[in-house]
Amino acid sequence: MADDLLNSFTSGPDDQGRFGIYGGRFVSETLMPLILDLEAEYERAKTDPSFWAQMDDLWTHYVGRPSPLYFAERMTQHLGGAKIYMKRDELNHTGAHKINNVLGQILLAIRMGKTRIIAETGAGQHGVATATVCARFGLKCIVYMGAHDVERQSPNVFRMRLLGAEVIPVTSGRGTLKDAMNDALRDWVTNVRDTFYCIGTVAGPHPYPAMVRDFQSIIGKEVREQIMPREGRFPDTIIAAIGGGSNAMGLFYPFLNDKDVRIIGVEAGGKGVDDRMEHCASLSGGRAGVLHGNRTYLLQDDDGQILEGHSISAGLDYPGIGPEHAWLKDIGRAEYVSITDDEALAAFQLCCALEGIIPALEPSHALAHVIKIAPDLPADHLIVMNMCGRGDKDIFTVAKHLGQDLKT
């Protein structure tokens, strides 16, 4: 890889929201003024010290940042290879990384005078975070969630309703994250005056991919600071799970220009990445197309119709990927692999048994890849994986797949 490319890794997107050929703004004329207003407000906020002072205060005193960087000693001993650290973002208020970004977007909404917040959610963590921050600031909250996800993520549905949000089950398609995002966009088009759309990942029309990345990059910034007193150097490898890709982009972005840091994103391989498309590994098994306002890698048929895909993890059950990830794949700065449902379940159980940490199924995919590669790496090799969510929400799904009845 040419060194001159490294200097440009953190300069994107361009003024049209493009990362190479990916990204952009593919939206209706009705939404374009809202998108442009949001972009302008974010540009003002980025240079406003009072905005970041409020963010830092809330990150510290409401979210509980910085999250710990934890040495997984027993996991390291068990695997017998690289030294494994976990970035413990599951310890954030609401139990995942999602609130890092939601805080920023809600503060922007308030600056813009918006009083009605809509969001999409898959695993429910973005919905819970949005409902939480809306409750904190007294804003109306509507969350669109696929009917299939409502069923398999019932604890988070109850949490959202406790927090005052209206949860709308989406029955179109397969009733998952893609369908929830479709309905949220329809809502936005018809409620342009008072509504702010809080997107949960690094996808959607510009400026969302870059804006969400910027808010989530607090993860990687903290890792850079935390690893130095522990090891005296940066990690050799950083790993994160990818659905739309916000937790991964948050970890990766501050390290993109560090050419000696290997970057690995882990997609949902479902039942295996093959022609049946019973997976959600769009970078491994998809091709470029347009969905939800941006051009990126997508699971689609020969006619360009979006395929449903499959993952045991509701948060990774999305047929696309953030456009910056697509660009990083094409230029070779990051590697992308896939992990099956069964491998993620095995990693989930091992983490519980060895570290006393119940992970969400999303980071269980990242951990499964750590389990694959760590034994073959030297003992002085440093791996940091992002433990981006806790597993409370997934215990019913895991129990079902393990053949256990929680009612007995």
Image: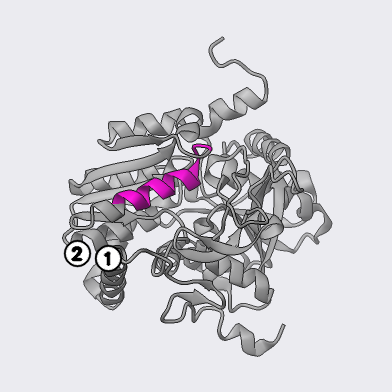
Q: Label 1, on which residue? A: 34
Give the residues drawn in magenta, as a range: 174-187
Q: Earlier in the sequence, mark 2 or mark 1?
A: 1
Residue at 35% over, 36% down: 168
196 versus 40 height, above or below: above
Residue 51 place in picture, x, y as percent: 25, 68
Q: Position of residue 106 (x, y in %)?
A: 27, 56
Left or right side of 73 for 178: left
Q: Secondary structure at mark 1?
A: helix
Q: Quadrant of residue 60?
A: bottom left
Quadrant for residue 59, please give it: bottom left
* Residue 281 drawn above or below residue 229: above
- In the foreground, 102 or 74: 102
Residue tagged 2? 111
| Residue located at (75% from left, 57% from top) | 82
Asked whether residue 251 is in view, the answer is no
Residue 129 visible (yes or no):
yes
204 or 372: nearer the viewer = 204
Q: Is residue 355 left or right of residue 154?
A: right
Disc 2 vs disc 1: Cβ atoms closer than 8 Å?
no
All told, the count of numbered labels is: 2
To which quarter of the image does residue 55 belong?
Answer: bottom left
Q: Bin the neighbour count of mark 2 within 10 Å (Cα to Cα): few under 14, some 14-19, many 20 and up.
A: few
- In magenta stretch: residue 70: no
Q: Amino acid at mark 1?
A: Leu
Expressed as whole percent of the image width and height from the top left, the position of residue 350 reads: 69, 37
